[in-house]
Image: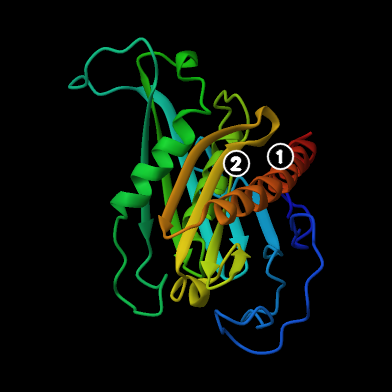
Amino acid sequence: MSGKGGSATPTTYSPSPQNQKKPKSLIFKDDVDWVRPDGRGFQHCRPAFLRTGAVSAASGSAYAEFGNTKVIVSVFGPRESKKSQMYSDIGRLNCNVSNTTFATPVRGQGSDHKEFSSVLHKALEGAIILESFPKTTVDVFALVLESGGSDLPVVISCASLALADAGIRMYDLVASVSVSCLGKNLVIDPIFEEENCRDGSLMITCMASRNEVTQLTITGEWSTPKIHEAMQLCLDACMKLRMVMRSCLKDSASSQE
């Protein structure tokens, strides 16, 4: 993690580790001892590299690299809302998420991701003080440069950082982390290969310092104890990720002085 001109050393933000056996093979969902493809423990997140000011033409921007997942987000505004839109005493937020044509192993399939755009909007809207820019609009454009797994949580976290870089008033930074259920195992911050064979997924987006969740997404079949365990893993990791994000902003501010 670094700010502008900072060190490129990735920063990890793993939740509190618990005792677990050393894994021994590839992905065997019913085996509690299998090795994750990238060698991490089940409760270890990927190293994170963060940088603000990645797009000079934008009001604010950020670049995030979590393992092989690479995302860049640009923020424009606040700027006057279109005349065709109804009058509003509060600001508007527009979000768009798209993939480059080379983001996935199947080349030439870059496109807008409407579902991701909708989730990103819901995740950020509750954290932004919309009353601070009435009659105007803030546009958030996220581009997935490389899809390596857990793309949406990385997009959300990177977008929050870009909004802060643009000077948009927020209640708190928004951090997002996901957990996949593979048989009896819960793995945090899953990569592409793990997502392809998961039985379920849980993603939390939260304002960690306020202990408020802005987005919770659950897919697949989950038992109540597993949901509680997965949520705690995500919340713990979000708290640590928020610290990394704050450090990035501080580094960026220091480099501009």
Disc 2 to disc 1, C-alpha distance: 8 Å
Q: Earlier in the sequence, mark 2 or mark 1?
A: 2
Q: Looking at the rendering, which quadrant does residue 61 occupy?
A: top right
Give percent across and percent down for residue 88: 31, 13
Residue type at mark 1 is: Leu
Q: Secondary structure at mark 1?
A: helix
The number of discs equals 2
Q: Are marks 2 and 1 in contact (CB under 8 Å)?
A: yes
| Residue 20 image offset from top left, x and y in percent | 78, 72
Percent x, y of residue 171: 60, 24
Q: Is residue 45 above or below residue 237?
A: below
**Mark 2: few, some, or many residues within 10 Å (few <14, many ≥20)?**
many
Q: Residue at x 39, y 14 (%)?
A: 90
Q: Position of residue 149 (x, y in %)?
A: 51, 67
Judging depth in this view, the residue of 154 and 142 nearest the camera is 154
Residue 99 drawn above or below residue 213: below
Q: What secondary structure is marked by label 2?
A: helix
Point out the image quarter for the N terminus: bottom right
Q: Is residue 203 visible?
A: yes
Query: Quarter of the image containing the C terminus?
Result: top right
Q: Hey, which quadrant is residue 15 in on the image?
A: bottom right
Left or right of 29 in this view: 90 = left
Determine crowd level at label 1: few under 14, some 14-19, many 20+ residues with C-alpha closer than 10 A. Answer: many
Three-letter code, disc 2:
Leu
Write down the residue under mark 1. 249
In front of the other: 139 or 148? 148
Point out which mark residue 27 bears: none
| Residue appearing at x 66%, y 53% in the figure | 233
Q: Residue 161 shows which numbered tag?
A: 2
Q: Residue at x 70, y 79 (%)?
A: 39
The furthest residue to the left: 84
Above or below 206: residue 107: below
